[in-house]
Amino acid sequence: MAYKKLKIESMILTALLALSVIFLGNSIRTNAASQTRVYVYPPAVTGLLPPATFTISVKIYNVTMLYGLDIQFTWEPTVIKYVSHIAKIPVETYPDGVLHSPVLPVIDQVDENASMPGSEPGTRYWLSKASMLPAKGFNGSGTIFTMTFQVVSIGYSPLRIVACTLADKDGNPIPASLENGYFDNRPPPPPPKPANVSVTPSSIVNSSLDPCHNFTIDIEAEVENLYSYDFGLGYNATILEVVGVTGNPVFPPPTIIQATGQIDISSSLTPPALPINGTLSLVTIKFHIIGKGESVLDLHDAVFRNKNGTTLPINEVNDGYFNNMIITKMFVDPPEIIDPYMKPGDIFTIDIDIQDAIGMYDYKFKLGFDNTVIICLGAIVLPPNNDTHFNVQQIVNNTAGMIWVYVQYYPPAPPINIHGARAVTRITFMVKNYGQTVLDLYDADVSTPSGGSLNPVIEDGFFATLLTDVAIMFVNVTSPNKVYPGKIVTIKVIAMNRGNLTTETFNVTLHYNSNIIGVKTVTLGPWSNATLTFYWDTTGQIPCHNFTIWAEASHVPFELKFDNNVYYDGWVKIKMLGDVNGDGVIDILDIVLITIAYGSRPGYPNWNPEADLTAPWGVIDILDLVTCSSRYGWHC
């Protein structure tokens, strides 16, 4: 048994020695062709919030006969504050450092005010040291210094090598490339602001617009970074026909495709034109009236794109309406009063409006309401033409939650013509309790002197005094942030109903960058939360890509606060197969991690699932080692 164990260990050792020869050969070939580099590592530090601390290194790579160095470094102290540093000189003291002993210290000074005499502008750390005889020149790679910072605010700070001079034993400069880094804990930019697009004016109701007359509408957009647009407009072809389209001159003349009852319009800017921001009319459309009736001006299939061709989100698409036949309406104005700050004892009013009533002589209505939420204090009649020849009947029944109003004109009052909308009655309410109620307009009529009905269209109102607010409280990647393509990433999202009265049902959508991971629907009572678990299958994702994770709660009715509906937190990096530690390069560190886990299986103390690179799964073996070694030197 001992012999067999020894034989297996010898085989593994032989394989590792063979691989080391391969790595050494690769290293020699790489170094021979590589330039000396002085670089900040890690190159990017992101996401840390005050008062976190972090440490960076300034390293040198592939230097020959280094005998002295002078390096000046800077950062932004209003964002990150210096804590401490270690100059890793000489290698006899710091094996991962640079320069051989004995060493002559020249300068090793930190000044966050950047006021050191003789330094380059902006320098906050200055390190200058040189070897002395009988020291030999330093060859290879190492760490020049490490520096620890504390995060003190939200912002961006360069981690910049202001100046660097390397000298060989003869005092000649050694050429080197410089690679800076940065710190950034600013939140990622929000998704593009949704655009609004609408038909303006939204309604044209005019009985004098007979056939053979014309009218125009605008397609108006409120948008950011608009570079091209495309939309369709449908209409009743028995009533209207399009006889002209004029585009906004900021865009090239639009492309127009017409069919019966339909027009499609598109246009696009061309470089070097700048994108359009703000509110503007895209096109003016001229209609010729060919009949009597009504038509929805159906704005549909609107697509807005930015300069990169990315589709912009559209929040609202508002249609238009045309009618050259009179339609009388009676409605509550305003149609909605939603005020979370209104409290019991407060008073508010609504109007009952009548619109487009020709030959009106009297009107009546009942208005129902929830008497546990509001009580009615009474109504005042607002004569539309100031004629005094009318009678008023009014009944307020707060027990039943109803007010009845009947206004009847009598001779010599002439019939009343209302064009557009006019308030005819004002009703006063007092808030009794927090809550919401429909203002139910019913048993309503508008009639002529002969008693004939104008058959008004009736529209209710709504009142609410409550806090309606849903939010995303937390997003967290609970599985490793650095994964191979095809791995499942587990993400927790906490959604909350921050409202004070109503149960809300809403969607929670989880995103990686602008892509959707999944959507879950939650129903939550007032001031309660739920933890949702999402699983993201990363199959097909390209290695070396970082993704920002964010969640969004859909809006609920009567919600007024939207800034907490979106929450950014967390990131996931897709790493290369073989990049065991996820640092963006397949190197000896990854090989070491695999050798540490060599022969292990799940449950073993040295098991490392990130080292299990290929089948057979569940064991770290020579195939995993070779898979990594075959990619040695790959980097993002």
Image: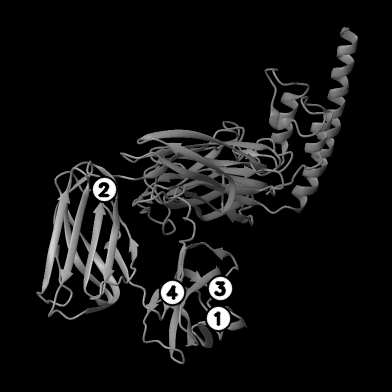
Q: Residue at x 48, y 52 (%)?
A: 188
N-term mark: 4 or 2: 4
N-term mark: 4 or 3: 3
Q: CA distance from mark 4 to mark 2?
A: 33 Å
Which residue is under mark 4? 321
* Element type at mark 2: loop
Judging depth in this view, the residue of 236 and 122 nearest the camera is 236
Which residue is under mark 3? 231
> What amino acid type should be assigned to the residue bearing mark 1?
Ala
- Classify the position of the N terminus by image quarter: top right
Q: Position of residue 245 (x, y in %)?
A: 52, 86
Say above or below: 4 vs 558. Answer: above
Is disc 4 surrounded by few (<14), some (14 to 19) or many (20+) residues within 10 Å? Answer: some
Judging depth in this view, the residue of 156 and 192 nearest the camera is 192
> What amino acid type should be assigned to the residue bearing mark 3?
Phe
* Element type at mark 1: loop
> What amino acid type should be assigned to the residue bearing mark 2?
Pro
Q: Which mark is residue 237?
A: 1
